[in-house]
Image: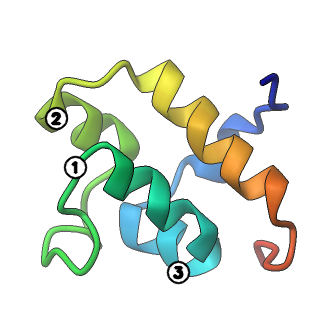
Amino acid sequence: MMCTQQQDSLDRTLSEIMSTWPQTVPVFLRHGMHCIGCQIGPFHTIADACAEYHLDEADFRRELQCAINASPRVRPD
């Protein structure tokens, strides 16, 4: 599946991403990431989390963007 990527929209902390686009939470869970409710979430970026979980950052960003595009109910400020 091809998803349009808006790099700047995802340049936020993990907590900001999940609160702005709750439909991204399943992407984190699918990868076994414990970022949901983590105390470091307000400080960690996608790059930090991908490094911690040994994920390809570009692929992970695409997955997040696909989740955002698939459910446009919540939009960033």
Quick one: label 2, few (<14), some, or many (20+) residues within 10 Å?
few
Q: What element carries label 3?
A: helix
Amino acid type, callout 2:
Tyr
Q: Determine whether the residue tagged by mark 2 lies in a helix, strand or loop.
A: helix
**Could you tell me if the residues under marks 3 and 1 are in contact, i.e. CB atoms within 8 Å?**
no
User: Residue 68: horizontal and vertical position, in percent?
Assistant: 73, 56
Percent from the top left, x then y, of residue 63?
58, 37
Instruction: Determine whether label 3 and label 2 are within 8 Å by CB.
Output: no
Query: How would you rate the neighbour count of disc 3 (Cα within 10 Å): few for under 14, some for 14-19, many for 20 or more?
Result: some
Q: Name the residue under label 2.
A: 53
From the image, tell me which residue sits under label 1.
32
* Dot placed on the residue nearer the N-terminal end, 2 or 1: 1
Earlier sequence position, callout 3 versus callout 1: 3
Residue at 24% over, 81% down: 37
Amino acid under disc 1: Gly
Which residue in the structure is indicated by mark 3? 19
